[in-house]
Amino acid sequence: MTASCWDDFAAFKSLVRERVEELLAIHVREVARYAVRGGHRWRAMVAIAAGRVFHGEALEICLPVGASIELAHAASLVLDDLPSMDDGKLRRGRPCTHLQFASTQWAVDMAPVFMINLAYQLALANERAGYRERVESASQMSHVSHAMIAGQELDVTQASNRGLEGDDGMLTCYLAKSGALYGSAAEVGAVTCGAVFEDRLRLYEAGLFLGLAYQFMDDVCDVVATGDQSGKDSRVDSHKETAVDLFGVDGTRTRAKMYQEESLDRLAVYGAAANTLRELIRNASWAPS
């Protein structure tokens, strides 16, 4: 990646999206190809931008793990949209995967398993990273898979949703379902580029708070955006309690901003090499770009 791309956030976004699409096109099969296509690629960008804090060649080094994170995210979307969960109809401006491939439901059932295993394979086969870094990256991705499942269970059952205070309720759900994936994306990028434990933890926390901010903004999206704007169903969360139900649209936006600031605070010890990640934290949104 040229220096100008690190200095130009729009160019960074465009290049990361292009490179992730190219890599995924090589490896994924038909149903998975449909499920993983499109999207902002924020999570891959987080991994690469976090890696950039520690290594100038972060794009090449972190591209496989960035694609891996996107595969894990896409797998979760396929499952989220199933009739047994959110019963989604529209995702990324297209029919949800289970609707597009309704005549071959067996392939839809297999696709998330394929994508998760491919994610591990890409991370472990990353020749630009050391053996230890590859294993640690895959291990971290395993941890986040468990967290996302736990978060989805809380989301579906609405277990103990009593607000954002304490260790239970909505914040616990959002930390696991959304925050952990962003946190792991940042930590995996840092690990792949050789970060030490203290820096890994700091980057994980930065990603975690970014994930919370994104989830709160996504709750706003569910209420204020049309399907044409967001690429997915509107009011899909109307049957359950969200941050908007607790705080209203403006209050949810305020809290999203608060989490963004918490994320940025974790990067205060780093210099200009963290600027791309800072721009991402300020700009990550459901809105089209």
Image: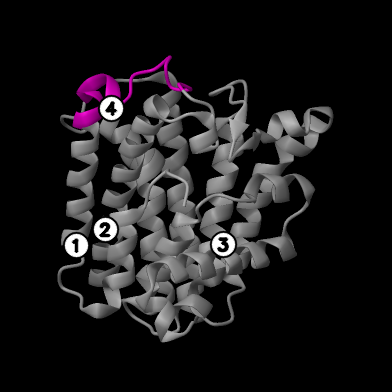
**Where does the magenta region start and end?**
235-251
* Residue positioned 16% across, 29% down in the render: 165
Which of discs 2 and 4 lies nearer the camera? The answer is 4
Q: Quick one: label 4 or label 1, which is nearer the N terminus?
A: 4
Q: Amino acid at mark 3?
A: Ala
Q: Secondary structure at mark 3?
A: helix
Q: Quick one: label 4 or label 3, which is nearer the N terminus?
A: 3
Q: CA distance from mark 3 to mark 1?
A: 24 Å
On whether residue 247 falls in the magenta region, the answer is: yes
> For mark 1, what is the residue?
266
Classify 122 as above or below 284. Answer: below
Do the residues under discs 1 and 2 have CB atoms within 8 angstroms? yes
Q: Amino acid at mark 1?
A: Arg
> How far from the left and from the top, in percent, is residue 144?
43, 50
Crowd band around label 1 with a 10 angstrom C-alpha radius: few (<14), some (14–19), many (20+): some
> For mark 4, what is the residue?
243
Task: Classify residue 89 by image quadrant.
Answer: top right
Frontmost residue, 207 versus 143:
207
Classify 194 as above or below 179. Answer: below
* Residue positioned 65% across, 51% down in the render: 37
> How far from the left and from the top, in percent, is residue 107?
78, 38
Which of discs 4 and 3 lies nearer the camera? The answer is 4
Report the disc number at residue 67: 3
Q: Secondary structure at mark 2?
A: helix
Q: Secondary structure at mark 4?
A: helix
> How far from the left and from the top, in percent, is residue 96?
65, 33
> How far from the left and from the top, in percent, is residue 194?
37, 79
Crowd band around label 2 with a 10 angstrom C-alpha radius: few (<14), some (14–19), many (20+): many
* Residue positioned 29% across, 44% down in the render: 213
Frontmost residue, 174 versus 275:
275
